[in-house]
């Protein structure tokens, strides 16, 4: 069964609003979670590394003020897309692993559409 | 060039074997993964292999690693219509919990009846 749960599965919002996406590890604690973005028919691009209890690490070119990440507990990380614009429409996927020697498991993704 | 490369499409007949190939450039890659993505869904971990292994088999799936050539392949025996999906090759230097993964662009597996 799924070990990483992501919510919501899809969301439609108006330009200028903010959207929060949740990522939960279901049966293990994850000090680190990862947020990816996938454009249609393209590969996954790592956006940021979410660290429990500390600031997230963002990849080059990803605006930290636009994509707010909070990793408040060992089983939950949230990604908030602030002041969303149509170009933020994409498929966002989170991932986590039990430990550094275990493979990454992915959530089912969130399809964001900004109108 | 790209860190991880894959062919974009592979077409096979139902019942035949599918072989999806992947090459990577980072000789420090220690963990190599295959993920499956069905339309509109997240990624499903199929299998992974450590760089000190040459082969790993799990039911219909066989992974072969040629570390010298930095070449990874995924063989799916007796391909079924349910295998139709995009398959991503990915690599990391450390375990998946320590850093993120670098993905290929994905190979779209098309099953012909």
Image (cartoon, helix red, strand yellow):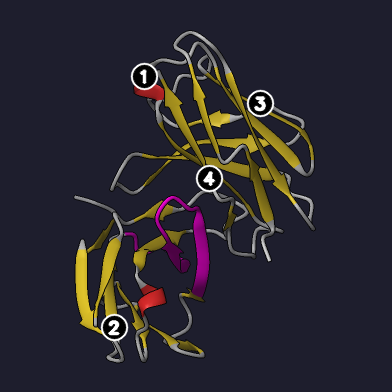
Q: Earlier in the sequence, mark 3 or mark 1?
A: 3
Q: Nearer the viewer, mark 2 or mark 1?
A: 1
Q: CA distance from mark 3 to mark 1?
A: 27 Å
Q: Nearer the viewer, mark 3 or mark 1?
A: 1
Is label 4 on the same chain as label 2? no
Q: CA distance from mark 3 to mark 4?
A: 23 Å
Is label 3 on the same chain as label 4? yes
The residue under label 2 is: B18
- The circle drawn on residue A109 is 4
Asked if marks 4 and 2 touch (Cβ < 8 Å), the reply is no
Is label 2 on the same chain as label 1? no
- The circle drawn on residue B6 is none
Q: Name the element at disc 1.
A: helix
Q: CA distance from mark 4 to mark 2?
A: 27 Å
Residue A63 lies, in percent from the top left, at: 46, 19
Q: CA distance from mark 4 to mark 1?
A: 18 Å
- The circle drawn on residue A86 is 1
Residue B81 lies, in percent from the top left, at: 36, 77
Q: Chain of mark 3?
A: A
A62 or A87: which is nearer to us?
Answer: A87
A79 is within the stretch colored magenta: no
Q: CA distance from mark 2 to mark 1?
A: 38 Å
Magenta-highlighted residues: B26-48
């Amino acid at each position: 069964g799924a070990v990483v749960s992501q919510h919501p599965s899809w969301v439609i919002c108006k330009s200028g609003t903010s959207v929060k996406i949740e990522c939960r590890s279901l049966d293990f604690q994850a000090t680190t979670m990862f947020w990816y973005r996938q454009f249609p028919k393209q590969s996954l691009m790592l956006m940021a590394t979410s660290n429990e209890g500390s600031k997230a690490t963002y990849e080059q070119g990803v605006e930290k003020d636009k994509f707010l990440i909070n990793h408040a507990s060992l089983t939950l990380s949230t990604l908030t897309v602030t002041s969303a614009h149509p170009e933020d429409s994409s498929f966002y996927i989170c991932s986590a692993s039990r430990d550094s020697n275990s493979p990454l498991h992915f959530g089912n993704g969130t399809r964001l559409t900004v109108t | 060039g790209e860190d991880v490369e894959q062919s974009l499409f592979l077409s096979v007949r139902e019942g035949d074997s599918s072989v999806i190939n992947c090459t990577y450039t980072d000789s420090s890659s220690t963990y190599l993964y295959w993920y499956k993505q069905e339309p509109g869904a997240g990624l499903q971990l199929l299998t992974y292999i450590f760089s000190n292994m040459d082969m790993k088999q799990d039911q219909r799936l066989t992974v072969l690693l040629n570390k010298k050539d930095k070449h990874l392949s995924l063989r799916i025996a007796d391909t079924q219509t349910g295998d139709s999906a995009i398959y991503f090759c990915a690599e990391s230097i450390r375990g998946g919990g320590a850093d993120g993964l670098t993905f290929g662009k994905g190979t779209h597996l098309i099953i012909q009846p």
